[in-house]
Image (spheres, rainbow, N blue to C red):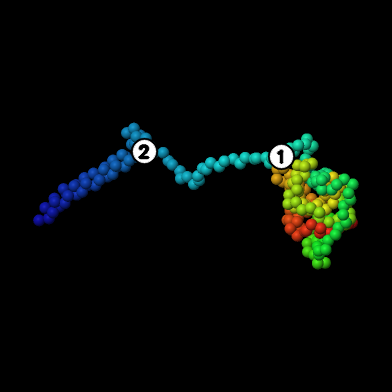
Amino acid sequence: MNAQPANRRGPLFILLLLGLFFLIALALAVTSFASPAASLLRGEELPTATSEVHFMLAEIAKPTYTPLPTATLLETSTPLPTPTATPPLLEMSIVEESSLPSGESEAAPSYSGSKYILVDISEQHMYVYENDQLLYSFVASTGINNATRTGLFQVQSKIPNAYGATWNIWMPNWLGIYWAGGLENGIHSLPILPNGAELWAGYLGRPISYGCVVLDSYDSSLLYNWAEIGTPVEIRW
């Protein structure tokens, strides 16, 4: 009675073993087919490894240097003076010989207003008064080698932008105050060179001109708009 069940289990066990062997063989075949060695045997190229890029390349133009234009004189071969530690001479004047006939002296200042300009050479400073009250206080520069004349003068001309033919420069906010021969000396802003630069920028507060009184651009514009023809100008030590 017990022999029959044992005989049935024998063939079933063999079938299970065969099935397991088949699955193992199939797995090995699939693994071998996907391996690099199998790919080489089949003549296939292996994929190359790629690394992730963490940067980008950009083309940036190399900066170029453009030199500033140099000042040139139109009607003279005399070299234009440049700012130095010891400023050179520069004639700060405009030519108006017809304004003062030869042999005629300057008229004494006559003014009935309440405005007054004081230039102190020893301090290199200008004080501007109205109604006996100090209105402006400006750093100024006068002529080197005591070239600025002392005395009591007056504003005798106003020119928004006077031209200095001797050196081919412009002198903004020109207030003429006295004549030196056939040339007029005055008060004006830092002179402008042919290339647009300000001559003597950074040198105010020390003698730099050849007779005129020099202010910076902002201060000279204030004074120019305020001053009148006839306003007294005193220059003293």
Q: Quadrant of the N terminus?
A: bottom left
**In percent of the image, x 38 and y 37: which residue is there?**
46
Q: In this figure, which residue is indicated by the disc labeled 1?
A: 70
Helix, strand or loop for disc 2: helix
What residue is rendered at 84% in x and 45% in y? 182
Write down the quadrant of residue 131 in the picture. Answer: bottom right
- Where's residue 134, x and y in %? 80, 65
Can residue 163 be seen from the camera position used here? yes
Query: As rendered, which of 1 and 139 lies closer to the eye?
Result: 139
Question: Does residue 41 show up?
Answer: no
Label 1 packing within 10 angstroms: few (<14), some (14-19), many (20+): few
Image position, residue 170 (x, y; %) = 74, 46
Instruction: Give how far apart the Cα atoms at labels 1 and 2 are.
Output: 73 Å
Q: Nearer the viewer, residue 205 or 163?
A: 163
Q: Position of residue 204 (x, y in %)?
A: 79, 52
- In the image, residue 122 sits, relative to residue 164, either above or below, namely below
Farthest-out residue, left: 1
Q: Which quadrant of the figure contains the C terminus? A: bottom right
In the displayed structure, does residue 141 sit left or right of residue 15?
A: right
Which of the two marks, 1 or 2, is nearer to us in this view? 1
Check if mark 1's residue and mark 2's residue have beta carbons within 8 Å: no
The amino acid marked with disc number 2 is Pro
Residue labelled with disc 2: 36
